[in-house]
Image (cartoon, coloured by chain):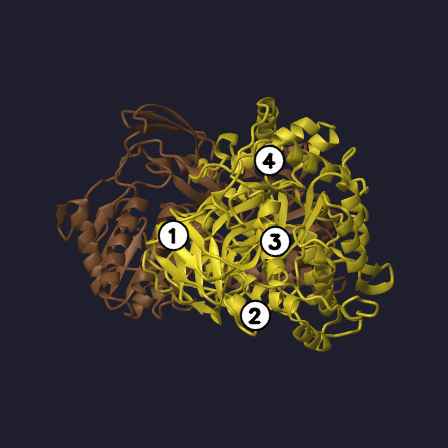
Amino acid sequence: MSQMPVGGLVEHVTCLGCGCSCDDIAVAVRDGRIAEARGACALGVSWFGDGRVPAIARARESTVTLDAALDAAATILDQARRVLVFLALDVSCETQRAAVEVADTLHAVIDGVSSSTVAAAVLAAQRRGRVSATLGEIRNRADCVVFWGTDPAARYPRYSSRYAPEPAGLFVPDGRRSRRLVSVDVGDARGPADADTRIRVRADQELDAIAALRVMLAGRSLGSVPGDGGLAELVRTLTASHYVVIVYDAEPGGLPPEPARAESLTALGQQLNAVTRACVTPLRAGGNRVGAESVLTWQTGYPMTVDFSRGHPRFRPDDGARALVAAGAVDAVLVVGRALGIPFALDGLRSVAIGPAASEAPCEVAVDTGVAGIHEGGTAFRMDDVPLPLRAPVPGPPVAADVVRSLAQRIGTRRTRRS
Amino acid sequence: MTDRLRITGGAVYDPANGVDGDVRDVCVEDGRIVSSLPGDAPRLDAHGMVVMPGGIDIHAHIASSSVNQARRILSDERTADPASPPALLDAIARSGSGGTVPTTFTTGYRYAGLGYTTVFDAAVAPVGARDTHAQLDDTPIIDAGFYVLMGNDAYLLEQVAAGERDRARDYAAWLLGATGAYAIKCVNPGGIESWKRNVRAVRSIDDALGMQGVTPRAIMETLADAANALALPHPVHIHCNNLGVAGNVTTTLDSMGALSGRRAHFTHVQFHAYAGGNGKPWASGAKALIAYINAHPEVTADVGQVMLGPATTVTADGAVEYLLHASSGRRWVNVDVELETGCGIVPYEYRDAAAVASLQWVVGLELFLLSADPWRVVLSTDHPNGGAFTSYPELIRLLMDRAYRDERLRGVNHKLLAGSALADGLAREYTLREIAIITRAGPARLLGLADKGHLGAGAAADITIYARDADVAVMFATPRYVIKAGVLVVEEGQLRRAPPTRRLHVRPAYDDAVMRDLSAWFDRYATIALANYPVSPPRDAPVPVGAGA
Ligand code: SF4
Ligand SMILES: [Zn+2]
């Protein structure tokens, strides 16, 4: 916190405004505030803001010292019958690692935003695997880019210019002109306006369309093909390409809800690899949500919704945070990350929040921390599971990883003393 | 904590120092072996027991983006193998889950529980190095390092194409330091890049790979020369072309021949030692391969034994995994990584009823049993590819106990075993000295770890003490004591402490000129700023490189 610049230009800053995690932002700092996030898109500029965040520790209605807040937090969590630890947004992997330790020690349930957003895709990967590529591979190799019901311009603004289809790459030297851009419009969810090919699929026929593509790929004929006949053409385009990427928005609110989409597209992508090279890559939103899945996986074996109540991790995909809170199955919650905007209400629960603007959430104990990537460094994962370093262009409140570690310490000590 | 400890009365197996089961004391002070201690130093009674250096795994997959992708899809097998926290005295103990790819904490605990104190992850994509360090930070007790993948790196291949071998060496040096790696890994040289271009087979090491002058041979030569010129503690670590393909022993022998006279390590050679192919049935190629290795002192290898039972195949060699998926219909993960490398995963099971799996099992054992020099042919299962590291005790029993081995041999599918040396009868039984070599002293020597793998004064006090058992699998699965850097980690068979670990990495010097060129390359092709690419240097000092090391 202390050795951070209060003025000047901090380069190569990573933005967590969306899952693109652009790491080329130059942040101009004046008087300890962000004057400009150079290179960021509008979404990124608003994610950075001016760098001002609340910086208090609060227990009930009063401002207290950090130590007092952590003591109060440890007492609440230690006394609870069943705790939910919730990994919210804008914290680093270092913070997430400490939060999983707290959950493990408390025999709590731990979950994050994934269970209410991408659970179907997580389960699909467990059944079928996945065919994927990092964004650098797509940038340098993909000569056929299929946006599946998705125009990245809205929610992933720099995807097109940084990854595909715009940039020139090692095997696509003329950038956009080296690539075929395909838009598959699913119902009202339309792909990019400048697509070379556009195929329209009714929202209620999306899975049929994928199935039809698979049948045609396998060289079998179809009785009737859904849509406007473009699917047969699409199969020809895909198989004639050297490296296909199918991009879809895995976060809610983009495409019409369809739980089987991820698995169907994965099956299509796997099948395509019998003839050419292909990958299917989800677009993921920001705040290091992908990092939470990675950390949970390496520490527990499961990317979301882990129950430690038996003293070891159990995967409970049907009992995510929202469901547990709704069922009254937990009596205390620890939110690590941005507590405003979590997918459940805290009413009637004992609650602790540690994270950016925690004090603005209706929690019993709150410790404001910096925002990962703005006030504190560490590691975050890009949407393609590539880890990136975070910088801290402006000073801020206590570092979340330190705060959660010292909470873990307190809880660990209490538990050890008792056993 | 144990600052001083005298281990008394045990039969000591310290082959690096010529000690072969002699009953003698081993003295430990401040984490190191010392030649003597005052008489009043605390004692650990090891009468009737076997004392060895801590185990060293030269090739495993325990902490990488690929390993984490594997963990993610294995929820079924790990549900059946939950891991409660051990009762530690000095640290907060963590739970986890096992299966063939355990979680990080469980990996550390289980390795230590087997008497292993040092492990190397054998395949890390440069761009994922930060992920590996974070996972290793959460892997307790064992010291660890990793090998960084270079055999399909587009920048490196360009240097090979341009004949810029010095720049290739400087790049390799930079990349080792930037990623905090320990050695150079070369997987299916050129074959992963080919797979990304939909060219699925590299027929020979002289195949032109679509770039002027780039052949698997040229890639291997470049990387071997780079490692040797930099005087790295471990030479280039090669996974040959054509893994798992009938007839591939030809490719493997060609690869070894290509590097003839150069120091090089060939990994999981079992997967590269098959005869047959071209319409002929699979057969063992072990005899030819091991004859070559026996005759060429510059060549070293780990076996990559297949253990009958569950496994998870996880490799940078994506093309292989596609074939396995296509032939088995199993779940399949492929991730093409950033002009650097690849990743393929297929959960698998080697069944004794299956002809090829049985052949693989036999080939690995033949390599062990026909090896003339245990210092150069060391133990691995390519965890979790041939089987999990938790099967090492069973593997040791297969090597030490002929009656048991013959009994197992009778139970496997013999369809492809005609003419195999093992089927014809191999009487050899490994001695405890030889086991200590292939699991400790040998790997330490191959890795250039001067202070590990032995019990001479000055060595790290990483020590495993086994109670003898008629069943050596039991003996090796349940050490009575394990000492890591002088700390009693396992006591009376129970995991009790989790002391801090050490990251093993190198930071060789290079000519800065490469950075100008590399910077231009990053501007054109990378999705990460060059300034953001290097990991924060590990807190442990690098292992020295160079002539004096
Ligand atoms: S595209 Fe996403 S990561 Fe990049 S600047 Fe915009 S919001 Fe930030
Ligand atoms: Zn391997």
Marks 2 & 1, CB-CB < 8 Å contact: no
Report the mark closest to the observer, 2 or 4. Answer: 2
**Few, some or many C-alpha atoms within 10 Å of disc 2 (few <14, some 14-19, many ≥20)?**
some
How far, Cα to Cα, is label 2 from label 4?
58 Å
Identify the mark at residue B499; answer none if there is no mark.
1
Identify the mark at residue B473; answer none if there is no mark.
2
Quadrant of the drawing holding the C terminus of chain B: top right
Q: Is residue B427 left or right of residue B419?
A: left
Q: Position of residue B80 (x, y in %)?
A: 49, 72
Q: Which chain is yellow?
A: B
Query: Mark 1 — on which chain does it sit?
Result: B
Q: Position of residue B61 (x, y in %)?
A: 56, 54
**Disc 1, SS:** loop
- Please check whether the numbered discs 2 and 4 fall on a single chain: no
How far, Cα to Cα, is label 1 from label 4?
50 Å
Q: Is residue B246 left or right of residue A6?
A: right
Quadrant of the drawing holding the N terminus of chain B: bottom left
